[in-house]
């Protein structure tokens, strides 16, 4: 489910597959698609799955009981995603666009390990020790254009701070530091230049 969001998919889907000797290669017994909003996060997708899956499973079991065998998957459709590594959870404002960062953040909200923000400035300025990690847990795509050196805080809004990415500014609204979620403006604006 994380990859649907990381890749910026606008539609997702759930399938029930017949188990065979491969990995996810058995016949398709049922499928259902759903829309993914621009700000839907991992928890929203889990909620959708909990709404869809029980009924889908019961309907499928009923169909199997009546002799349904499913239909083969088209091997030319879809793609495989690898297992994610911790290194793939690092936000790099210099090489990533606002959309790429936003998609990563919404795919990795708590309880998932959230993406780590490389510290901008000296964490001791905010009363935190060196080596303190800050994790981004909520962002918003904004219409207003902000440009400049990537990774800089360029504006403070009531709802957060704008940090320039590879292509433009992104509003960071919530961060997690020392296991506690806080408004980004409360933490990051303390290093405002």
Image: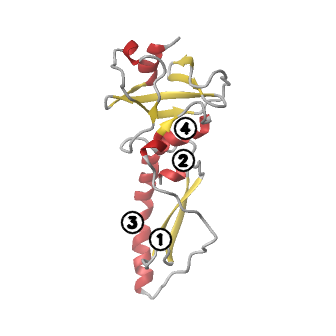
Residue 102: give its label: 4
Q: Residues within 10 Å of mark 4 (few under 14, many from 20)?
A: many
Q: Earlier in the sequence, mark 2 or mark 4?
A: 2
From the top left corner, tell me how far across and down residue 127 is, in percent.
34, 14
Q: Residues within 10 Å of mark 1 (few under 14, many from 20)?
A: some
Mark 4 to mark 3 CA distance (whole Å): 30 Å
Mark 1 to mark 4 CA distance (whole Å): 29 Å
Query: What residue is shown with label 2?
Result: 6
Q: Residues within 10 Å of mark 3 (few under 14, many from 20)?
A: few
Q: Secondary structure at mark 1?
A: loop
Q: Secondary structure at mark 4?
A: helix
Which dot, 3 or 1, sits closer to the camera?
1
Q: Residues within 10 Å of mark 2 (few under 14, many from 20)?
A: some
Q: Secondary structure at mark 3?
A: helix
| Residue 8, above or below 155 | below
| Residue at 36 percent of width and 25 percent of height | 131
Mark 2 to mark 4 CA distance (whole Å): 8 Å
Residue 54: give its label: 3
| Residue 54, above or below 146 | below
* Side (left or right) of 74 relative to 1: right
Residue 24: give its label: 1
Labelled pair 2, 3 in contact (Cβ < 8 Å): no
| Residue 77, above or below 191 | below
Q: Earlier in the sequence, mark 4 or mark 3?
A: 3
From the top left corner, tell me how far across and down residue 144 is, in percent.
66, 25
């Amino acid at each position: 489910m994380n990859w649907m969001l990381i890749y910026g998919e606008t539609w997702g889907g759930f399938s029930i597959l017949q188990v065979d000797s491969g990995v996810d290669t058995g016949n398709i017994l049922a499928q259902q698609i759903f829309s993914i909003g621009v700000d839907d996060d991992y928890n929203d997708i889990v909620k959708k799955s909990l709404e869809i899956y029980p009924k889908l499973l019961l309907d499928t079991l009923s169909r199997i009981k009546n002799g349904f065998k499913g239909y083969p998957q088209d091997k030319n459709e879809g793609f495989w995603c690898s297992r994610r590594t911790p290194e793939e959870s690092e936000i790099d404002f210099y090489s990533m666009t606002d959309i790429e960062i936003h998609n990563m953040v919404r795919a990795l909200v708590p309880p998932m390990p959230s993406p780590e923000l490389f510290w901008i400035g000296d964490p001791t300025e905010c009363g935190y020790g060196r080596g303190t990690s800050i994790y981004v847990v909520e962002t918003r795509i904004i219409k207003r254009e902000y440009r400049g050196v990537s990774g800089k805080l360029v504006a403070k809004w009531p709802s957060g701070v704008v940090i320039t990415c590879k292509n433009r500014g992104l509003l960071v609204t919530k961060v997690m530091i020392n296991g506690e979620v806080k408004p980004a403006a409360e933490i990051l604006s303390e290093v405002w230049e």
